Image (cartoon, rainbow, N blue to C red):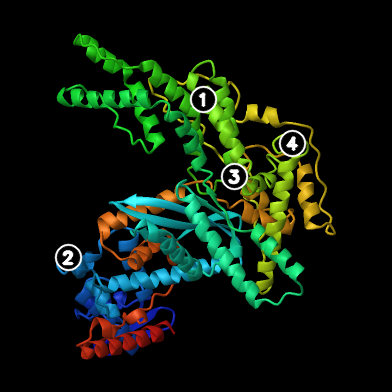
Amino acid sequence: MKIDNSKFYTKIKNNKSICLYCQKVVLGPTTSNIRKHYKDVHNIEVPRKIKQKSVYEECAEASFTERVNREGVRIDIDISKFLRCCVGLVAVNNLPLDIYDDDKFFKTLIAPYERKFGTNLNSRNIIAVIKNSCIEIQQIIREHIKNKMISLEFEIATTMDNRFLVINIHYIEDFKICINTIGVIMLELKQHHQAMYQKEEIIKYLQTYQIDMEQIYFSTSNNSENIPQISNIISNVKEEQISDEFIEEKCGSAENNDENIHSIFSMALHVGQSIAHTIQVTVYDILKNLETHLNECRDIVIQLQNTFSESNAQIQIPNLDNSQHWYSTYEMLYSLLQIRQPIETWYIQRDIIININWNFIRNFVVAFNPLITSTKKMETEQYIIGDFYRDWLCCEIELEDLFSITPYASLLHESMQKRKKVLLDNGAFLSALYLDPRFNFQNSIVLTEEQKSIAVANLLKTFKVLKKLEDLKPGGLKLKEPQVEGLKMELDSSNTSSNVSFEFPSTSSESTYSKLEQRMMKSMISVSNLNAQLTFQQKLTLLSNQKKVPLQTDILSFWNTPEHDHDIKKVASVALAVPVTQVFMEKAFNALSTIITKLESNVDNNTLNSLLLTKLNFEELNSKNIDLDISDHNISRNFFFPNNKKIIKTYERKNIKQQQCSENVQS
């Protein structure tokens, strides 16, 4: 009801009101004083004046009140964010697909959003939304790697008696290593069909991301048995592509044609063993000769578990190791060594004799500890070949200090020397070291002249391919020149807690890298700024005269500075992206295991790929606020409400009216 207060008082300027009964002027910016005057003097109760709202304000408030009263929540997100959250619940937070069929709880929880956006999600159409998300992610990755050289990483995983081939790509963007999973192949066919099946699937994924074979700089697999098969598959794909290209291409002469073919085949993809896998192979060279002692230790652990599970002794017995993972074997023996004193005390108090070869356990733990330290340093995605080689050399030096303490140190050192020769025969490995001023500097003893020549030849080939790809890209390849964030990175050199009962023998009183620095230090000279007229090969050669940088330097940040040559930086962004760490591959395995065990054990290959790719690359989708339109892929309102067009029209009219009111209020 509208209240008329004009018969009681009149508002005038300077925050004053005039009483119409006695003509008294009352001060006050509001009507409180004048109403109090009427009550005290005239004994009249003047009601408070209610401000009349505009039509637009009433419309907006009614819309808001209706939503709050009817739905109980205020919805301030759009439909794209709502769908991204729904996708994230399944793909990232591992909720099962059938949670969208839970009418009792979950559907009640999201009902206000579904009424707002006109959706009706269930376990079937949420898969369509996830596949839509996967398509958007694939497009984002395609843009990232367009006309760039990348490295491929293959690995076979086994989950619930199913075998999968996981494919990752590695590349550098603004001198940050980027890793994306681009596909997973289910290996469930018989062996004689396996090669053709893998070939077709690998080709499919490369085509999906528009990856040309010349874009592949390096390819690696962590499974030594799988290397020849994948290498042959990729080489065949490469050969077929080259043949098709030269059938269509018009060449000037046969000699020129032969030279071009030879040049391209010299860049042919070779699938090599994973660099990170080298440590594991080195360890297994020794473990196979210690199997008898290790089996005895496993029997002891089982015996201790049975004994102490029946007693009230507060002794934490270690878990049995997994023979396929040497790290777990080390953890088992190290944990056993930690509880040596309480175990011996417990058995002595009961006059029981137990034969435990503590000397073997101690020698094993001491000898393998340097490799454990090196392995822990690899647990980061921003880890390059130079970091790996630095930690490898430090591990060798530490093992040398342990020769007189444990017999297994010399065996490990010998195995590392043998495996290091294999690493230094790898052109991609040498190229990364050549671009690393921690190892390639004036009078460096790390690389021989022959190894430098191999690295330069490999980098020259890479540069030619980059120039060819750059010609395909409008405007050329442009690298950003961000501010230097710092060259040093912190490395955790500790590998044991401070309160352990077992202490490792000291191998050196010097800092982590000081001994290695002493071996590498030679006379060094500074390099003047590169002449713009120098050829790329001359620029590469001059890198051998650069000044050495400290071993703890972050080389990715080192190259991400304006003073370095633009062409060298382009090649470095390829050579330094070669897979070294297994961190992201382990994430892929964990995600794959989660999808198979917790979500749907019988999902088809397309759905499995969509779930895995969305889970591992969800930040690409979320950070760019990708618009997930429900009209795509038959996920429209008609799809959700096929038999109720009246509801759809009601919601559409209501949403249009609310939107108009909101716009008018804002204006």
Q: Give the labeled residue for mark 4.
A: 444
Amino acid identity at mark 2? Phe
Cα separation between marks 3 and 1: 24 Å
Instruction: Name the side, left or right, on which 237 lies relative to 157.
Output: right
Name the N-terminal-most of marks 2 and 1. Answer: 2
Amino acid identity at mark 4? Ser
* Secondary structure type for disc 2: loop
Q: Residues within 10 Å of mark 2 (few under 14, many from 20)?
A: few
Q: Position of residue 183 (x, y in %)?
A: 43, 62
Q: Position of residue 515 (x, y in %)?
A: 64, 26
- Tell which tag, 3 or 2, sits nearer the viewer: 3
Cα separation between marks 4 and 3: 17 Å
Q: Give the labeled residue for mark 1.
A: 411
Cα separation between marks 4 and 1: 28 Å
- Identify which residue, 338 or 31, lies in the foreground: 338
Cα separation between marks 3 and 2: 51 Å
* Secondary structure type for disc 4: loop
- Tell which tag, 2 or 1, sits nearer the viewer: 1
Name the N-terminal-most of marks 4 and 1. Answer: 1
Amino acid identity at mark 3? Ile
